[in-house]
Every structure is written in structure tokens, then in C-alpha cells.
Image (spheres, helix red, strand yellow):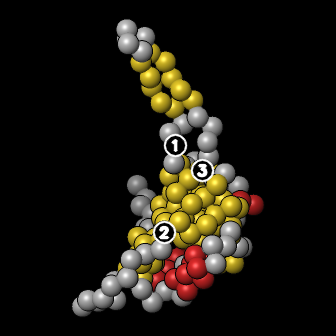
């Protein structure tokens, strides 16, 4: 059985089409989730159930970077001007997981602080009409 090693150099991120995320600056890297479940079970007073379907594709992207990452400056400028931008991420280790949106804004900047080490910076991004893929992606989404 062949085992494939995870390689952080195969993780690609873009903001406005430009590559970001130097692997040396990534901590937890990236996560994406839709803000509303696609299916929600419901039940009435007498136990009759059903499903509510949602086609809302708004999402939350989280990016955690090392404090010295140059991507912090990019995200900070976008946050301070409240600018809209495109944002995409692909895990090329699997070539199956990706997330992308053409309508992003920084929803929440990281808290600031100091200590023994420089620490990490967690950015929360609001992504409208996002595409989150678990089983293969189209190259053009980036």
C-alpha cells in the first residue's frame, strides 16, 4: 500500500487572482463552511416531519496565518477599506478540496496581542455565493 505524504507546498491560495499564502507563513491555513445548512429536519407538534432545503451558498472562510506573513498586510488593507475581493483555496495534495468566492469581504480582523512568541492571526472572511467542493474542483474557479 502506497502512502502519500501531505505536502504544505501543494496548498494554493489566491486573493484577487494573485497567489498568497507562503507555506512558511501558514499555521492552520484555511477552512470553509456554508453559513446555512443545506438540509434541516423539521417536525410539527404531532411529530410529522419534513426537510427544509436551503440553496443559500453564503460561506465563512477562516484563514490562520503566522504573525509575520505578508498576507496579513493584504487582508488588513482590504479590511480597513471594506473592499470586496475574490478569494480561493485549493488543497493540491488531494486535488479534491477547494473553496472560492468572487464576493468576499473581511468580516473580522484578528485580535492583537503580544507574548513570548509572535503568535498567529486568524482572519474571518464573509464569502457570498461561495463554491465549496469536497470531491474535485474545476481549475477555473481560482
Front-most of 62 and 18? 62
Please name the residue shown 30% across and 88% down the image: 114
Please name the residue shown 43% across and 67% down the image: 5
Please name the residue shown 75% across and 60% down the image: 140
Residue to which mark 1 is pinned? 36
Front-most of 71 and 52? 52
Q: Are marks 1 and 3 in contact (CB under 8 Å)?
A: yes
Give the left or right position of residue 82, taking residue 91 as reference: right
Please name the residue shown 51% across and 23% down the image: 51
Q: Secondary structure at mark 2?
A: strand
> In what quadrant of the picture does the N terminus appear?
bottom left
Q: Which label sits on residue 108?
A: 2
Q: Which label sits on residue 110?
A: none
User: Where does residue 47 sit, x and y in percent of width and height?
Assistant: 37, 11
Front-most of 63 and 24? 63
Q: Secondary structure at mark 3?
A: loop
Q: Quadrant of residue 12?
A: bottom right
In front of the other: label 2 or label 1?
2
Q: Earlier in the sequence, mark 3 or mark 2?
A: 3
Amino acid at each position: 500500500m502506497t502512502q502519500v505524504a501531505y505536502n504544505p507546498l501543494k496548498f494554493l491560495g489566491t486573493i484577487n487572482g494573485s497567489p498568497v499564502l507562503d507555506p512558511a507563513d501558514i499555521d492552520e491555513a484555511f477552512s470553509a463552511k456554508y453559513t446555512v445548512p443545506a438540509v434541516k429536519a423539521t417536525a410539527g407538534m404531532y411529530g410529522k416531519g419534513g426537510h427544509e432545503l436551503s440553496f443559500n451558498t453564503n460561506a465563512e472562510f477562516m484563514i490562520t496565518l503566522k504573525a509575520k506573513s505578508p498576507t496579513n498586510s493584504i487582508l488588513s488593507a482590504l479590511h480597513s477599506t471594506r473592499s470586496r475581493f475574490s478569494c480561493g483555496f485549493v488543497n493540491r495534495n488531494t486535488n479534491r478540496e477547494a473553496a472560492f468566492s468572487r464576493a468576499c469581504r473581511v468580516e473580522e480582523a484578528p485580535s492583537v496581542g503580544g507574548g513570548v512568541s509572535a503568535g498567529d492571526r486568524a482572519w474571518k472572511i464573509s464569502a457570498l455565493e461561495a463554491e465549496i467542493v469536497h470531491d474535485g474542483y474545476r481549475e477555473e474557479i481560482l
